[in-house]
Image (cartoon, rainbow, N blue to C red):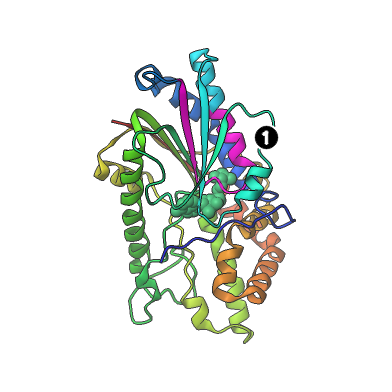
C-alpha cells in the first residue's frame, strides 16, 4: 500500500499554505544554484525542434504558495537565458491525488507567465507521456517514501523500532537499513519514470532539506510522554514510523548511477541563510511540521492523540530552541542537478 498523507489543506491557521516558511527558505536557498545550472547546462535549441512549447513539472508541489514562486523562477531564468518571448510555458503541478488541488488552483497568481496543468498521482510512477518535459523540479518532497518499510511493522524483526518514530536515534542498524532499502526501491521507480518523461538534454533539479529529520524526535518524545501517563498504548508508538528518508550525497549518487540515464551536473550539501535556524525559531518550525505531518499522525493515532502530541510538542519550543542552538547552528540542504543523457 502506498503512503499518501497530504499536507494540511485549505488556508486555516494550521494549513500548509500558511505554514511552509521552512520549505520556502529551502527554495530560496537554492534559487541562485538553480539559475546557474539552467544557464550552464540547459540547451533548449537542441530540444525544441519545431515547437515553442517549454514544459516544466513541479513534483510534489502541494497547495502553494511555494510552488508558484519556484515555477515562476524557472520560467524567468529560461526566458532570461534565451532573451526570448516566443517560448510558451506549460507548468505541470504534480502531487498525490488527495492533495488539495482546489486550493492550489484557486490561488494561482494572476500575473503568471505560463499555462498551468494539474497532474495527480505518485511521482514514483509514470505521470506524463514520453519525452514531454524539459525541466523537472522537486523541492522538499523526494524524502517521502512510498510506504513505511514493512520490516518496521514486524514486532519480531530486529527492525522493530521500540519507543521511536524514525531512524534518527535508533540504536539498531536494521532500522536505518530498512529505510535505505525502501528509499532505493522508490528511487529506482522514480528515475525510471523520469528517464522516460524528460527529453534528452532536459534537466531535473532535486532539493532536499536536512533539518526535519532531527526535529522528528521531539514529536516522538511527546508521544512517549502520553504512553508514560497511560493515555496511549506503547504498541501504537512502536509500530509508527514516519516514512521519510533524507538522502546523503552518497545515497543520491548511488541511485542516479544505478539508473544510468542522467549525468550529475552538480551535487552538494549547502548551508544557505535561514532565519528560522539562525534564530532557532523552534515554534515556527514545529508548526510547519505539524502542517506536514498531521494527516499521517491522525491516520495512525486518531485525531485526539495526534492533536495532543502536536500541542505538547509546540509547547516544548523553548527546549527545542535550546537544543538547536547547541546541535543545529547552520541550515543544511542537498542540491542535485541532473541532465538526461
Ligand atoms: C513538504 S511538501 C513540499 C511542497 C512544495 N514542493 C514546497 O516546496 O513547498 C511535500 C509534498 O510532496 C508530496 N509528495 C510526497 N510523496 C509524493 C509522491 N510519491 N508523489 C507526489 N507527491 C508526493 C506531498 O503530498 C507534499 O505535498
Q: Can residue 202 be seen in this view?
A: yes
Name the foreground residue: 222 vs 190: 190
Q: Position of residue 225 (x, y in %)?
A: 62, 77
Q: Position of residue 100 (x, y in %)?
A: 61, 53
Q: Give the range drawn in magenta.
A: 52-74
Q: Which residue lies furthest to the right in this view?
A: 13
Q: Relative to 289, is 40 above or below?
A: above
Q: Does the magenta stretch include residue 157?
A: no
Q: Is mark 1 on a helix, strand or loop?
A: loop
Name the foreground residue: 48 vs 60: 48
Q: Does the residue labelled 1 lie within 8 Å of ligand 1?
A: no
Q: Relative to 260, is 199 above or below?
A: above
Q: Relative to 337, is 163 above or below?
A: below
Q: In this view, does 27 lie to the left or right of 107?
A: left
* Residue at the spot 32% in from the left edge and 39% down from the top edge: 196
Name the foreground residue: 303 vs 161: 303
Q: Name the residue under label 1.
A: 109
Location of the N terminus (image quadrant): bottom left
Location of the C terminus (image quadrant): top left
Q: Where is residue 134 in the image (x, y as percent from the top left)?
A: 41, 30
Q: Relative to 180, is 191 above or below?
A: above
* Residue at the spot 40% in from the left edge and 69% down from the top edge: 171
Name the foreground residue: 310 vs 107: 107
Amino acid at each position: 500500500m502506498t503512503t499518501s498523507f497530504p499536507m494540511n489543506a485549505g488556508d486555516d491557521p494550521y494549513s500548509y499554505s500558511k505554514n511552509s516558511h521552512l520549505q520556502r527558505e529551502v527554495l530560496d536557498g537554492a534559487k541562485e544554484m538553480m539559475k546557474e545550472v539552467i544557464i550552464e547546462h540547459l540547451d533548449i535549441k537542441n530540444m525544441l525542434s519545431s515547437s515553442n512549447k517549454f514544459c516544466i513539472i513541479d513534483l510534489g508541489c502541494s497547495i502553494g504558495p511555494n510552488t508558484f514562486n519556484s515555477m515562476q523562477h524557472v520560467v524567468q531564468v529560461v526566458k532570461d537565458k534565451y532573451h526570448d518571448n516566443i517560448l510558451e510555458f506549460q507548468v505541470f503541478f504534480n502531487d498525490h491525488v488527495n492533495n488539495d488541488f482546489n486550493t492550489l488552483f484557486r490561488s494561482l497568481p494572476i500575473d503568471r507567465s505560463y499555462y498551468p496543468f494539474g497532474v495527480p498521482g505518485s511521482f514514483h510512477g509514470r505521470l506524463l507521456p514520453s519525452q514531454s518535459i524539459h525541466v523537472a523540479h522537486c523541492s522538499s518532497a523526494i524524502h517521502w517514501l512510498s510506504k513505511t518499510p514493512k520490516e518496521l511493522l514486524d514486532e519480531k524483526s530486529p527492525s522493530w523500532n521500540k519507543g521511536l518514530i524514525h531512524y534518527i536515534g535508533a540504536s539498531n542498524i536494521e532500522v536505518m537499513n530498512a529505510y535505505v532499502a525502501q528509499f532505493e526501491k522508490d528511487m529506482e521507480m522514480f528515475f525510471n519514470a523520469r528517464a522516460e518523461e524528460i527529453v534528452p538534454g532536459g534537466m531535473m533539479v532535486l532539493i532536499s532539506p536536512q533539518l526535519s529529520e532531527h526535529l522528528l524526535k521531539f514529536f516522538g518524545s511527546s508521544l512517549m510522554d502520553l504512553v508514560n501517563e497511560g493515555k496511549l498504548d506503547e504498541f501504537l508508538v512502536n509500530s509508527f514510523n514516519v516514512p521519510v528518508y533524507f538522502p546523503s550525497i552518497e545515497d543520491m549518487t548511488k541511485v542516479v548511477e544505478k539508473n544510468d540515464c542522467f549525468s550529475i551536473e552538480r551535487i552538494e550539501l549547502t548551508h544557505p541563510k535561514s532565519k528560522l535556524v539562525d534564530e532557532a525559531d523552534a515554534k515556527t518550525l514545529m508548526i510547519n511540521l505539524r502542517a506536514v505531518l498531521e494527516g499521517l499522525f491522525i491516520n495512525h493515532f486518531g485525531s485526539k492523540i495526534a492533536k495532543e502530541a502536536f500541542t505538547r510538542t509546540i509547547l516544548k519550543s523553548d527546549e527545542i530552541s535550546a537544543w538547536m542552538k547547541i546541535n543545529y547552528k547552520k541550515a543544511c540542504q542537498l542540491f542535485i542537478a541532473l541532465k538526461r543523457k
